[in-house]
Every structure is written in C-alpha cells, then in structure tokens.
Image: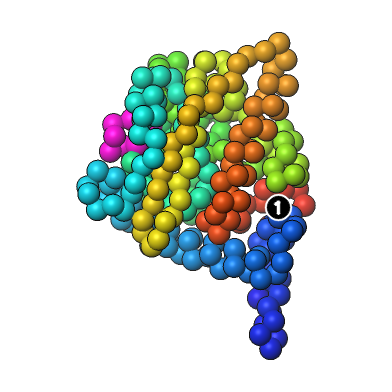
Amino acid sequence: YISVTGVQTCALPICFNIRLAMPELDDAAVERIVVEMWDNLGRLGGEVPHAPHLDPRDGSGRVEIVGMEHVEGIRKAGAAIVISGHLANWEVMAVAAHRYGLGLEIIYRAANNPYMEKFIQSTRHGEMLQKGARGARTAIDVLKRGRPLAMMADQKLNDGIPVPFFGRTAMTATSLVDFARKYQAPVFPAKIERLKGARFRITLLPPMYFEAGPDRHADLAAGMTRVNALIESWVRERPGQWLWLHRRWPESPL
C-alpha cells in the first residue's frame, strides 16, 4: 500500500485481480479484502501443523458440518467427486473426510519447495495424487474402482477451456466434468468458511450431475460454467477468505 495522510491506494497485483472480478467495489472495500486475505493466509500457515487435530467429532466445536446426509451420499455413490476451492483453510476438509471414513483420493498441485511439500504432506490425510498426466490416469483408476475422488476446482489451467468466471474469460480445467460424464459420478460441492479464529464450517451441498450428450465440448463448457458460477458465489459471500494470488484471468499481472 501507498499511504499518504490516511489515504491508501492498493498498488499490488492482488488488487488488480479483485478489481477485475468486482469492479463495483471502491478502494476501501478492496483494501478490506486484501487485509482479510493475508490474515486468513497467515492463520492457515499457523494451522497447518495442527490440522490433523481439527476433528469435527471431538466436541470442541472448531469444525461444524452442514449437510451430513451428503457424507452418506458420497459413501453410497462409491465413484463420486468432491469439489471445493481455496477458501478459508481448505486443508480442514481432508481431515474431516478422513475422520468420517470417506477415504478420499485427492488431486493436488505440489508445492514448489520440496521441503515445504514434505512438511505439508506429513499433515495431510488421504491418498494424494499430483496434478498431471500420471495423476489423471490414477484418478480414472480410482473412479473405475468405485472410490471417491476430490479436487480443487478454482485454479487456472493453461490447457483448459475458456469459461466465464466473475464475468470474464478464465482458462478452466474440465477434468471433473469429463470424469463425471464418463463414469456417471455425482459431484458433491463442499464449501468451507472460517467463522472466527480457528473455527470452521463445512457445508456439503446436494450433488451435481453431468450427463453425457452428443457434443462433448459443449457438455464440458456448460458443466464448468455451472461449477465456476457456484465457486464465484462462494467467493462473493466471503471474498477475504479466497486465495486471490492465483493468476486466474489472462489480464492478471500475477
């Protein structure tokens, strides 16, 4: 920030992203989102070593779950896909899934720093599948075996397709819709919110279904438009809890 006599102007690339997504916001609103995002990210970093202890069943009230009926829905579906985004402390969801015996296999992007990657992996639950061709092959095998898969649906993929996100074109991965079509797997959205401090709410929503029509490309575009719209609604509810550091749009300077 540049501060002159109490007037602050956000000159950071992150502010450019926020203004791209929500041009209706004034400078004060953008500033609040930036401060809240860094606060959330700092808390997340401090919570990572303790994530395995954030148990929704321990009576502490630190993690509450809305939509418990969908936990059973995932279990009964077998080949199911759970999707979420980089909101609040997204690591808590894998812990909760493990505590309820879902055995999710999670597609993720490895950290660039190998020491940080090793540390993060030591705190995680579930089988981790790195993004890429090998991870995709393993994900297909998971669904073929009737097991649930989890993935983040809010990241940029250069090899994806252009799909609206906050009214702007964003290159978007299509694998979740492709998998859902091919293996008739229901897609369960899971939203996480930070309520206060290290207290969270996980909301499991009714499953989304993606049928295979005659035009695969049209199916993928329509399906990911639905997914992007859902994630956008989550971000708009709590914009300070989303990771705005992604280079989500081609115009972004990040």
Residue receiving disc 1:
21
Q: Amino acid at mark 1?
A: Ala
- Which x, y percent locates residue 20? 74, 55
- Relative height, residue 44 to residue 77 (above, below): below
- Say if the magenta span includes residue 188: no
Q: Residue at x 24, y 53 (%)?
A: 60
Which residue occupies the foreground of this view, 126 or 83?
83
Rendered image quadrant of residue 209: top right
User: Quick check: can you spot residue 222?
Assistant: yes
Rendered image quadrant of residue 56: top left
Residue found farthest to the top: 214
Q: Residue at x 63, y 69 (%)?
A: 31
Which residue occupies the foreground of this view, 156 or 8?
8
Q: Residue at x 55, y 59 (%)?
A: 240
Which quadrant is the C terminus positioned in?
bottom right
- Which x, y percent locates residue 188? 48, 30
- Relative height, residue 199 to residue 147 (above, below): below
Q: Secondary structure at mark 1?
A: helix
Which residue occupies the foreground of this view, 127 or 58?
58
Residue 62 placement, left or right of 240? left
Rendered image quadrant of residue 163: top right
Residue 102 placement, left or right of 231? left
Category of crowding for the residue at label 1, using alpha-carbon neighbours closer than 10 angstroms: few (below 14), some (14–19), many (at least 20): some
Residue found farthest to the left: 58
- Relative height, residue 93 to residue 127 (above, below): below
Dominant secondary structure (helix, strand or loop) of the stretch shown in magenta: loop
- Which x, y percent locates residue 50? 31, 55
Which quadrant is the N terminus positioned in?
bottom right
| Magenta segment | 97-104
